[in-house]
Structures are given as C-alpha cells and as structure tokens.
Amino acid sequence: MGVDVAYRLSSDRAFGAAAVLDVADFSVVESAVADANSEFPYVPGLFAFREVPVLVEVLRKISTAPDVVLCDGNGIAHPRSFGLACHLGLLLDLPTIGVAKNPMMGEYSEPGQNRGDRSPVHMNGRVVGYVLRTRPGVKPIFVSPGHKVSVDTAAQIVLDLSPRYRLPEPIRAADHESKLARG
DNA sequence: GCGACAG
DNA sequence: ATCTTGTCGC
C-alpha cells in the first residue's frame, strides 16, 4: 500500500489518499481518499504533524490489510530519528517504509548509475537508510524504515515495487488518487 | 552562532 | 507541496 497527500493551496485543504496494490501485477486492488483542513504548516522535522491526521482518516476507509505501507517522506532518517513513516506505523501498528525524493539527514555517497545500486545513509555511525537508484542514470530516492521493517528489507521492498519508474508503484498510485481528489 | 532542512 | 506553458523525447 502507498499513501500520499495533495494540497489545494487556494482553499487550504489537504487530500489524503491510500492505494492498495497487488504485488503480482501492481494493479490497484482498493483505494480511498479523505480530505481535511490543513491545520499544521510544513515545518522540516515536524512533517508528520501535518500529514498524519488525514492519512489516519483515509486508512480507516481501507478494508484490505496491507503487508506494508510506503510513505512519502522519511522514516528513521530524521533529526529525531522519527519521521512520518515512524509516526504512521506506530499509530496504526503496521509495517511502514519512508520514501523521500530528497535527502534530509545523514551522510552518504553517490550510488552507482545502475538500477538497484545503493549507498548506505549514516547518522551517528549507524545505517539509517539507503540512497537507492531505481532507474539507471536517474536521481536516486532515499529509503528508511518506518516501523517493523529493517533497513535492508526496506530498500529491497522499495526496489521490487519500483519496476519501471523512479518512485515505487504504490506511491505513484496514491499520488495519482490524491491529485484526482484535489481536482 | 551559522547553515541545512522530507512535503 | 503548489502555482503554471510550452517543449523535448521515447
């Protein structure tokens, strides 16, 4: 499953979406959307307080039990080692993985140019995530565990769920749904 | 103190 | 993230 939130700046509303996919063919099995007023502003490090509320709402509408939830943002690769994916996972008691398009924390080196190439992201001498190349020659993504998933498993799952595009299919699907709901 | 800083 | 038109490429 993938989750994402789209905003309508002009009307101050947030549209959360969740999409459950079948790993066999990446088809969308179930999806749902929910909207709410965006209460909390975007503050780096406090991202969860902005998006978790509407995401919890939309997940209440999903009846399929997901194996893992991919979130737009970070997991433990966070200043307080507790990003959006950690909040959502602990709150719902579900395995979660953070998938960010840009780095926020940690030290890392540029991964190779081939699909699947990755470099560990270190924080205080610990590996908190991976910079993962999902498409050859394309900007890599930043993967870190949210809840109940190891660093290596998180990277492997995300790579497996990104067969064709830079971002994993579940997140692409959720992003699409949230934007449709936003109008 | 200064700079960096997911979406 | 959002606001926006066209444009280059498979």
Image (tube, coloured by chain):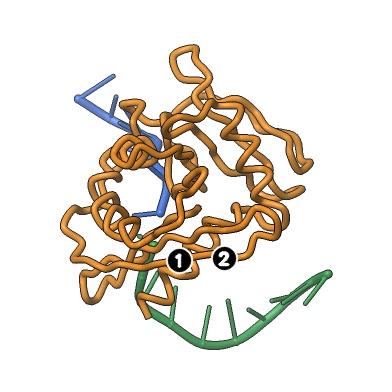
Chain colours: A orange, B blue, C green
Horizontal and vertical percent for residue A17? 39, 63
Badge 2 marks a residue whose secondary structure is: strand
Circle 2: residue type: Val
Q: Which residue is mark 1?
A: A31
Q: Residue at x 45, y 66 (%)?
A: A31
- Is A76 left or right of C9, judged from the image as shown? left
- Is A125 left or right of A24, judged from the image as shown? left
Q: Residue at x 76, y 40 (%)?
A: A113
Q: Residue at x 29, y 44 (%)?
A: A48
Q: Are marks 2 and 1 on the same chain?
A: yes
Q: Residue at x 60, y 25 (%)?
A: A120
Q: Residue furthest top?
A: A125
Chain under numbered label 2: A
Horizontal and vertical percent for residue A18? 42, 60
Q: On screen, A110 above or below A161?
A: above
Circle 1: residue type: Ser
The quadrant where residue A37 appears: bottom left
Horizontal and vertical percent for residue A170? 55, 56
Look at the numbered discs 2 and 1 and tell me whether their residues touch, using CB distance below 8 Å.
yes
Q: On screen, A163 above or below A87?
A: below
Q: Residue furthest left?
A: A39
Circle 2 residues within 10 Å: few <14, some 14–19, many ≥20: some
Horizontal and vertical percent for residue A51? 29, 52
Q: Which residue is mark 2?
A: A28
Badge 1 marks a residue whose secondary structure is: strand
- Is B1 left or right of A47, judged from the image as shown? left
Circle 1 residues within 10 Å: few <14, some 14–19, many ≥20: many
The quadrant where residue B5 appears: top left
